[in-house]
Amino acid sequence: MVKFNPAKLTITYKGVTDDGPICPRHYTLTRSETQDDLFLTIDSNPLLAEVSAAWDDSGGTYSLIVRARVDSIHDRKTEVQQRYDDLNRQLPLVLEAIRYGDSKFFNNHAELDYAPIFVHFISVYPEFGAVKYFGQPLDYLFIH
């Protein structure tokens, strides 16, 4: 797994600020194929991506919901298994980039550091279509 490097992270805000809103607030992280640069988009609207995250307040409390598309309809099961394993290894980096990239927002809403993170793996294969608990944003606080 690639170690998170804040110097390689570029952050773009669209329709949100460091103060809010909490909902809707969507995160999309992409990586350049050649330089390992990371691009975090924090937006009031969801972007189409294989992995995205958003705050949810249904049920009266906040949680960070991550959606990870594991496969497409044409993938073989062995490819899906590999992608599922890769996503499980890479998600901590994604969450660290979100926590670091939106740190002023977390400072303004400290209670969100303790919100649960749930990852919804989306797959045509039931064994890879699961919901997993991934801790809290505070678990992904970048320490130099």
Image (cartoon, rainbow, N blue to C red):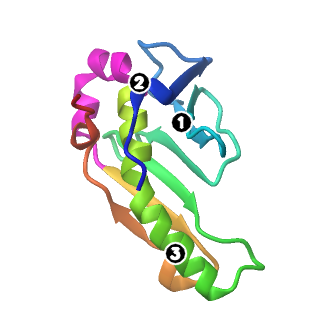
Question: Is 118 or 102 nearer to us in this picture?
Answer: 102
Asked whether the beta carbons under mark 1 and mark 2 sit within 8 Å of each other, the answer is: yes
Asked whether the beta carbons under mark 3 and mark 2 sit within 8 Å of each other, the answer is: no
Can residue 108 be found in the magenta stretch?
yes
Determine the image quadrant of residue 118: bottom left
Measured in 3D between alpha carbons, the distance from the residue under mark 3 to the one under mark 2, in whole angstroms, is: 28 Å
Measured in 3D between alpha carbons, the distance from the residue under mark 1 to the one under mark 3, in whole angstroms, is: 21 Å
User: Horizontal placement of 43 versus 118: left or right?
Assistant: right
Assign a secondary structure to mark 2: loop
Pointer 2 local density, CA inside 10 Å: few below 14, some 14–19, many at least 20: some
Amino acid found under the numbered disc labelled 3: Gly
Q: Is residue 28 above or below residue 68?
A: above
* Residue that label 2 marks: 102
Q: Earlier in the sequence, mark 3 or mark 2?
A: 2
Can residue 75 be found in the magenta stretch?
no
Question: Is 64 or 81 nearer to us in this picture?
Answer: 81
Measured in 3D between alpha carbons, the distance from the residue under mark 1 to the one under mark 2, in whole angstroms, is: 9 Å
* Residue that label 3 marks: 129
